[in-house]
Amino acid sequence: MGYPDSLKQLIKKVESTRPDRVKKKQDSVEFPALSLEDRDKVLKAYHPDVKEEGRREVMIGPNKGYRIAHEYVDILEAKSRISPEKIDLSKPDYETDVLVIGGGGAGTAAALLAQEQGAKVIICTKLRHGDANTMMA
Ligand SMILES: Cc1cc2nc3c(=O)[nH]c(=O)nc-3n(C[C@H](O)[C@H](O)[C@H](O)COP(=O)(O)OP(=O)(O)OC[C@H]3O[C@@H](n4cnc5c(N)ncnc54)[C@H](O)[C@@H]3O)c2cc1C
């Protein structure tokens, strides 16, 4: 696919100043670093994790009121994928080959692997599936 033209122009700019930057310390040209305020402006304008329009407020749950990325809010506010008709919570008595406790990355990977090997799997987790350290990482 290669770089888009806009990025190629930036690469040229970096390459054209490289010889000056790699000279010995005493001969090299000092390019001023951005001030903290300017960095903040650039981040707010372009960085997907920092741009205001890249975030929204969580409306429900323990993270209610936090402004975080839309993708996380979508997950945190999602309806459960478990159908209440399929699970009788008044009689929590199920037979399974593999019981996985914890729905983070490790538990989910283990459950998928066991299922692929033909085992009947139940995964139970204390919060919603995906509401785990793995998502934060
Ligand atoms: C902010 C943050 C950033 C991180 N960044 C990195 C990184 O950059 N690189 C890196 O390698 N690692 C990082 N880590 C560590 C990484 O997230 C964890 O090592 C990894 O996600 C652990 O995966 P896990 O599936 O074992 O646990 P988790 O993802 O924590 O999942 C545990 C699951 O068990 C459930 N559970 C807990 N107790 C019970 C219970 N009693 N009954 C039922 N369910 C229960 C939880 O609800 C959760 O679903 C970060 C962690 C955090 C918090």
Image: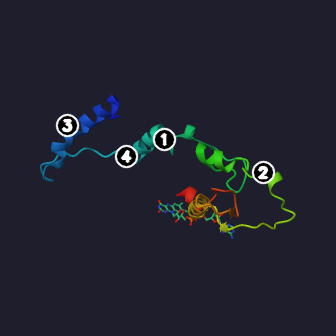
Disc 3 designates what residue?
Answer: 16
Please state which of residues 107 and 10 is positioned toward the viewer in this rendering: 107
Q: Which amino acid lies under the numbered mark 4 shown in the image of this protein?
A: Ser
Disc 4, SS: loop
Q: CA distance from mark 3 to mark 2?
A: 60 Å
Q: Which amino acid lies under the numbered mark 1 shown in the image of this protein?
A: Lys
Disc 2 designates what residue?
Answer: 83
> Which of pointers 1 and 4 lies earlier in the amino acid sequence?
4
Disc 1 designates what residue?
Answer: 44
> Which of pointers 1 and 3 lies earlier in the amino acid sequence?
3
Disc 1, SS: helix
Camera-near label (1 vs 3) is 3
How packed mark 4 is, by other alpha carbons closer than 10 Å (few <14, some 14-19, many 20 or more), is: few
Residue at 80% x, 57% y is 87
Quadrant of the rendered image containing residue 108: bottom right
Residue 69 seen anywhere in this rendered image of the structure: no
Marks 1,3: beta carbons within 8 A = no
